[in-house]
Image (cartoon, grey):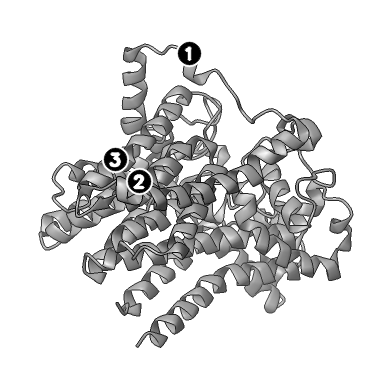
Amino acid sequence: MLLKMRYLKYLFLSMMFLGFFLLRPYHLQETGLFYAGDDDSYFSHAASIAFGQFPNYEKEYVPTAYASKGNVPLHSIGLGLMASPFVFLGAQIDRLLNPSIFEKRTREVNTKSWAGFGFVLATMLYFYLAMIFLYKGLSLHYGEKITFISLLLMLIFQILGLYIFRRSVFSHIYEFALQSFCVYFLLKNPKLSFKYLVLLGLITGLITLVRYNNFLFSLMWPIILLCFKEEKFVFKQNIKNLFIVYLVSGFLIFLFKIFPMLFYGAKEAYVSNTFINFISPVICAKKFLHIVFGIDFGLIFTAPFVLLGFVWLFFYKGELKRRLVYILCPIVLNIFLNIIWVGTIQGCWYGYRYFLFSLIPVMIIPFTDFIQKNWEKPKVKFFLMLLAIFPILSLLSFEGNNALSLVQKTDGWINLTYQLEIWKMIFLHPIQYFVVIFKGCFLYFLYLAAFLFNVTNKLPDIVLKIYPYFNIILFIRVIIIFLFPLAIFCITKKIETKKV
């Protein structure tokens, strides 16, 4: 099927527009978009592989609290493995500009390096690839305009943007991408071949390696993708195929997880007593209701289209319904993790990330079906546009202005009245809200314009404090981030054109 590139182009342009508001160039300048702790641990995996040291981590920077025996990072290795080719390419630039990174990786060296920037680009690449494959898969069943609207609302107006442009050195975009590839297979139903089975094995193995709590997906996806034919469960005929997939998946997990553990005798990361603690059903129910309706990061405010997709699943009559219900089963484990950690510092940053990034690719199917069947109703259009206001304002406001307590944490990492603070700022402090929204790339490009016309002395002191001098490296990286999606779109367009 030849894609109508116009709608796909609109998606890429929408992402660039979102990046204009969410990307903070001064964060990129100061920390390389690295957050202390988790990000250092994840990057050390990628660096160990990219610099040819794996499974040795002696040259890597791993904070003591995040290191096991042999300086092995406690965090999952999967995203480091997926990002390592880009880290390797970035390291070749460092070979010319900053060769010290080959001797020893420190936090300062990592965050300023092109190898670290390679990790950022890898995250963006996997998101754009996931968006393309979801677009291609959904377009097989629904109109491309409907597919565009669905992806616009589900991917761009909800939680993902912050994990693309602010927390790039983090696991969740990789989790989302891998789940999206499986959803694409579900929508396309490709012909069985040895290459497909090996590819499926690699993807399901990476699902576990990226986030260990997703191991149930690695078990479920091969069964769902291989053992259903027109909604009939066919198991015996697929035992050989399943064996190949699980063999590839198991080998990948052994090579990059079990082998290092045996090599160092290292303990597993975050082995906890979470699942042996008793939680009363009443408390569990209260926390679940908080996840859905809480005025901090409740799904009704931060991910309403996921909820809408879940509700429509009960009305969805497509042939994939049975399989969609089955693949929701592993998500119950991740929802339970978030229930355990509601109201605590562990597991928090923005939104309920422990299950949303696996849930979004699955819910995109019933959500698209809802739009297909209801888009011509004016009331539905108005309802969706109204609903979209809350998650996009929530995205744009996060980490915006501590002085007005917009993101001032009142309980660990959680602002318990976050959604209220947004509207208070809009109505009571509109100028300050303008500052929150436009303090990213808008401010940076304003600085660039003043620099080009040699009038930086007329800029407010706060601008000069953030950008005291013109940094050519920062400028190049910001331009790369904005041109990157255009490059991917052009490559995709060229590939699609060759199919004619």
Give the amino acid type for the residue marked by disc 1 in the picture. Answer: Asn
Spatial distance from mark 3 to mark 2, Cα to Cα?
Answer: 10 Å
Helix, strand or loop at mark 2: helix
Choose mark 3 or mark 2, whichever is in front.
2
Give the amino acid type for the residue marked by disc 3 in the picture. Answer: Tyr
Tell me: 217 left or right of 362.
right
Give whichever of 416, 236 is nearer the camera: 236
Give whichever of 289, 264 is nearer the camera: 264
Q: Which residue is mark 3?
A: 326
Could you say which quadrant of the image residue 483 lies in?
bottom right
Choose mark 1 or mark 2, whichever is in front.
2
Give whichever of 5, 482 is nearer the camera: 5
Marks 1 and 2 in Cβ contact (< 8 Å) = no
Percent position of residue 194, x then y = 45, 63
**Crowd tier of the residue under label 3, counting other residues whose Cα lies within 10 Å: few below 14, some 14–19, many 20 or above:** few
Tell me: 205 left or right of 151.
right
Query: Relative to 236, does residue 486 appear above or below in the rendering?
Result: below
Q: Which residue is mark 2?
A: 223
Choose mark 3 or mark 1, whichever is in front.
3
Give whichever of 357, 466 is nearer the camera: 357
Give the amino acid type for the residue marked by disc 2 in the picture. Answer: Ile
Spatial distance from mark 3 to mark 1, Cα to Cα?
Answer: 27 Å
Question: Which of the two discs, 3 and 1, labels the residue nearer the N terminus?
Answer: 1
One can see residue 377 in this view: yes
Spatial distance from mark 1 to mark 2, Cα to Cα?
Answer: 31 Å
Percent position of residue 200, x then y = 45, 55
Marks 3 and 1 in Cβ contact (< 8 Å) = no
Q: What is the residue that sits farthest to the left in this orientation? A: 377
Helix, strand or loop at mark 3: helix
Q: Which residue is mark 1?
A: 277
Percent position of residue 370, x then y = 18, 54
